């Protein structure tokens, strides 16, 4: 009997709604994931909104599904908002279907509620459904050489005069290494470009290099070869091959045994890649420049159990994994020595580009004019455009700032320099607070709220010396693009204070995870209606969002999820004119101190708060991307101690307190 | 812009003599008077922070000088009558539209909907 077609029963409203949502989930899975649901009972179910990608942990889901019967396998593809569960019998699966479809659960990690929608799926091969994508630019070629060629190559290596890795732990047997073409130096992880080794690359490699060129795996003939031999238990620490040493394409042939290599992205994502025996690994682009790669020193690898060797990523938690004892693996890694500095698009991990920045220390500008222009483009203009939307997302005053204001003596005159929408101007009625901001539109909002405010630049505040009992500067100074200007802003605050007066400064911290605690900025994966700043996930799964939030709000959160940063870079490339500044991915850690942070303008009001016709687009529609402008704001995020050090250079103030608060470095200064 | 706020503002145009930018002359085209709750202690604490002469000048230019004395009476903290007058001038009189003029350079800063725009151009900045 068809489980979803019970035509004899009278449906009440909530049943109809459940059915609608369930069908919607089915359609989404088909359209966007290629997963086909069926209407008859099978042993396997797909659970929409029950995935790692939407915050359901394995622990919690396993408990739920095990209650319904014997679970043969629970498959939770990483980054996906769904999971698969296979039961021992169709009866158990049916029971799970009845129990879990439409069930609302509270996520353990975030206390948010989601509703599960369950559908049956046919028996399919797990491997076909859940490839974890390899790091971009990474490719695998199987059986590049024959077993005979492999044998010949291994025998050709003369280990009698192999390299000794400096400072290797004497007690541990280290992997063996040999270089050809150019000497690779382990003290600086670079190549001595002026000292080519005599003999060049071994002749035995010629055929395979020809093949690689002919097949288009590489564009240029390599001139450097490193042979690494790993006994079981040996590895190599995670690293990126030095940008300035080698060109883009790096190829690595695995001989003697297979092995698992770990790739890791700066934001923490890891991908385990199986390298079969006699296969060629090709690293280009992001996989070569941004992801680290390494081999864990161990004697076993976790691999897929099913029969033949699997090429590609090793997916965890499949229910099909087993241990593979390692053999001795020898890698032939071919690279081309780089002659010009690297100009990749990953400056945070690029030694060529970092070097340039250091030359222009402490800032990447030479002139005040350039600094001012950058701030005009990427701070002032942006805030004027986004003022209303920005103001709508600023309404929770931070407790420690409130505390600072509440403890000031009654009748204190307090200046809020960079007051934005006036969030703090009305906190303590016993104070006389005046606010100022660079953005006319934001200050106008203060005026509407009947606060005292004016427009000015924080570097030149038109207020008398020593006239304030206290000042606050919250999330302002990090918008100045040179160290001198940032210091000048602090100096202005000090000037305004009377002797004994106090200033509170908050700036965004580079370290968004401190004392093992993630800041709210990192933790929050969801923007509830109008509350917090826009988020971008790097997975476009917008179609699930209205099922998850289930509030039918006009502020559909679909725009949050459909947009992702890589798309933004393309569509708004003309805005990001400064190629030295990386564009930050919201809700992730910072990799550079000077960044452009995207702001997705949302809502049905333009900058002046006038109503425009709300966009009526089907939920999750890709067209939404074109209507939602992205702005980039410049930030210099501060390292631990940086704000303090800057303040210490001013003789007229003393640092009274210094702390970390929710992703910000903070100081309280006292005027001497 | 209340007169207490005005009392803190100064012109910061390049080339102005030290102290020469204060007080800004008010040319008001729209003035509003509000009712603000009187808090005696609050007002008393404000008085030492205020430039008295500038306050008188500003109040007069708006026609709200009333009978504020040129000098502070002794023990004004307990003088409710006096403090009420100060309260009125400091906190209840608001310039909604007009101009603030730098006494030294003549530079004019507009006030719109109660908000002064003190932003200088690049050439004017010190």
Image (tube, coloured by chain):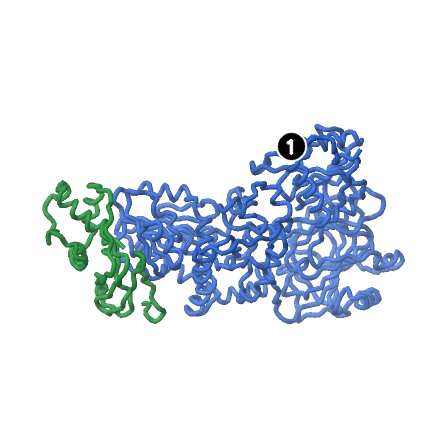
Chain colours: A blue, B green
User: Which residue has dot 1 on it?
Assistant: A12
Image location of residue A550, percent across then percent down: 59, 40
Mark 1 lies on a secondary structure that is loop
Image-quadrant location for residue A336 = bottom right
Identify which residue is drawn at 50% across, 67% down: A359
Q: Is A618 on the left-hand or right-hand side of A467?
A: right
Against A358, residue A274 (above or below) is above
Against A557, residue A206 (above or below) is below
Image location of residue B112, percent across then percent down: 31, 60
Against A149, residue A41 (above or below) is above
State the residue lying farthest toward the right. A148
Q: Nearer the viewer, residue B1 or A246?
A: B1
Image location of residue A303, percent across then percent down: 77, 44
- Mark 1 packing: few (<14 Cα in 10 Å), some, or many (20+)? few
Q: Is A622 on the left-hand or right-hand side of A670?
A: right
- Image mark 1: chain: A
Identify which residue is drawn at 35% across, 54% down: A417
Identify which residue is drawn at 80% across, 65% down: A212
Q: How many marks?
A: 1
Q: Nearer the viewer, residue B112 or A467?
A: B112
Q: Nearer the viewer, residue A558 or A281?
A: A558
Q: Is residue A322 visible?
A: no
Image location of residue A482, percent across then percent down: 44, 62
Q: Is B94 on the left-hand or right-hand side of A219?
A: left
Q: Nearer the viewer, residue A603 or A62?
A: A603
- The quadrant of the image that shows the N terminus of chain A is top right
């Amino acid at each position: 009997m068809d489980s979803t077609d019970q035509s004899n029963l009278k449906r009440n409203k909530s049943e109809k709604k459940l059915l609608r949502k369930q069908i919607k989930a089915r359609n989404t899975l088909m359209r966007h994931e290629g997963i086909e649901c069926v209407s008859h009972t099978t042993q396997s179910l797909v659970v929409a909104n029950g995935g790692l990608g939407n915050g359901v942990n394995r622990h919690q889901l396993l408990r739920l599904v095990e209650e319904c019967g014997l679970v043969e396998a629970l498959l939770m593809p990483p980054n996906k908002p769904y999971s698969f569960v296979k039961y021992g019998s169709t009866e158990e699966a049916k029971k799970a279907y009845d129990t879990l479809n439409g069930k609302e659960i509270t996520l353990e990690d975030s206390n948010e509620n989601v509703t599960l929608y369950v559908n049956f799926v046919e028996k399919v091969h797990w491997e076909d459904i859940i490839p974890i994508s390899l790091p971009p630019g990474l490719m695998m070629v199987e059986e590049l050489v024959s077993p005979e060629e492999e044998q010949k190559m291994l025998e050709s290596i003369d280990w009698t005069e192999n390299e000794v890795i400096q400072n290797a732990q004497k007690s541990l047997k280290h992997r063996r290494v040999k270089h050809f073409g150019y000497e690779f130096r382990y003290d600086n992880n670079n190549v001595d470009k002026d000292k080519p080794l005599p003999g060049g690359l071994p002749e035995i490699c010629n055929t395979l290099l020809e093949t690689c060129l002919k097949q288009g795996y590489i564009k240029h003939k390599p001139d450097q070869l490193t042979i690494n031999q790993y006994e079981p238990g040996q590895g190599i620490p995670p690293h990126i091959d030095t940008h300035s040493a080698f060109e883009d394409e790096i190829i690595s042939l695995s001989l003697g045994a297979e092995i698992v290599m770990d790739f890791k992205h700066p934001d923490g994502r890891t991908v385990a890649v199986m390298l079969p025996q006699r296969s060629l690994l090709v690293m280009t682009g992001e996989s070569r420049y941004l992801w680290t790669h390494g081999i864990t020193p161990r004697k076993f690898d976790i691999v897929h159990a099913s029969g033949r060797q699997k090429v590609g990523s090793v997916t965890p938690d499949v229910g099909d994994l087993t241990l593979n004892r390692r053999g001795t693996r020898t890698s032939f890694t071919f690279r081309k020595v780089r002659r010009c500095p690297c100009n990749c698009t990953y400056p945070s991990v690029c030694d060529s580009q970092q070097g340039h920045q250091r030359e222009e220390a402490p800032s990447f500008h030479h002139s005040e004019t350039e600094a001012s222009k950058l701030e005009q483009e990427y701070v002032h203009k942006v805030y004027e455009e986004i003022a209303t939307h920005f103001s709508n997302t600023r309404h929770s005053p931070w407790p420690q700032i409130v505390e600072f204001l509440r403890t000031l003596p009654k009748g204190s005159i307090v200046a809020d320099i960079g007051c934005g929408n006036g969030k703090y101007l009305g906190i303590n009625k016993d104070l006389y607070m005046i606010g100022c901001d660079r953005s006319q539109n934001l200050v106008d909002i203060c005026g509407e709220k009947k606060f005292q405010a004016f427009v000015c630049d924080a570097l030149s505040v038109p207020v008398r010396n020593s006239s304030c009992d206290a000042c606050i500067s919250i999330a302002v100074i990090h918008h100045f693009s040179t160290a001198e200007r940032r210091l000048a802003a602090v100096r202005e605050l000090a000037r305004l204070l009377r002797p004994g007066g106090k200033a509170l400064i908050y700036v965004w911290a580079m370290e968004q995870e401190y004392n093992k605690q993630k800041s709210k900025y990192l933790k929050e994966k969801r923007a509830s209606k109008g509350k917090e700043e826009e988020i971008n996930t790097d997975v476009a799964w917008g179609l699930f969002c209205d099922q998850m939030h289930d509030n039918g709000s006009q502020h559909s959160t679909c725009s949050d999820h459909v947009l992702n940063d890589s798309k933004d870079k393309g569509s708004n490339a003309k805005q990001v004119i400064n190629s030295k500044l990386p564009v930050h991915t919201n809700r992730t850690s910072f990799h550079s101190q000077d960044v452009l942070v995207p702001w997705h303008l949302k809502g049905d009001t333009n900058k002046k708060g006038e109503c425009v016709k709300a966009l009526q687009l089907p939920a999750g529609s890709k067209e939404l991307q074109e209507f939602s402008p992205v702005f980039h704001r410049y930030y210099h995020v501060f390292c631990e101690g940086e704000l303090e050090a800057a303040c210490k250079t001013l003789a007229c103030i003393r640092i009274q307190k210094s702390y970390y608060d929710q992703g910000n470095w903070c100081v309280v200064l006292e005027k001497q | 812009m209340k007169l207490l706020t005005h009392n803190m503002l100064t012109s910061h145009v390049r080339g102005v003599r030290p102290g020469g930018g204060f007080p800004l002359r008010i040319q008001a085209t729209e003035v509003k008077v509000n009712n603000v709750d009187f808090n005696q202690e609050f007002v008393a604490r404000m008085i030492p922070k205020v430039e008295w002469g500038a306050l008188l000048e500003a109040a007069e230019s708006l026609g709200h000088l009333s009978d504020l004395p040129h000098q502070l009476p002794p023990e004004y903290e307990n003088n409710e009558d006096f403090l009420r007058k100060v309260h009125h001038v400091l906190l209840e009189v608001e310039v909604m539209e007009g101009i603030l003029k730098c006494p030294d350079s003549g530079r004019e800063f507009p006030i719109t909907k109660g908000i002064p725009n003190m932003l200088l151009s690049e050439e004017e900045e010190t």
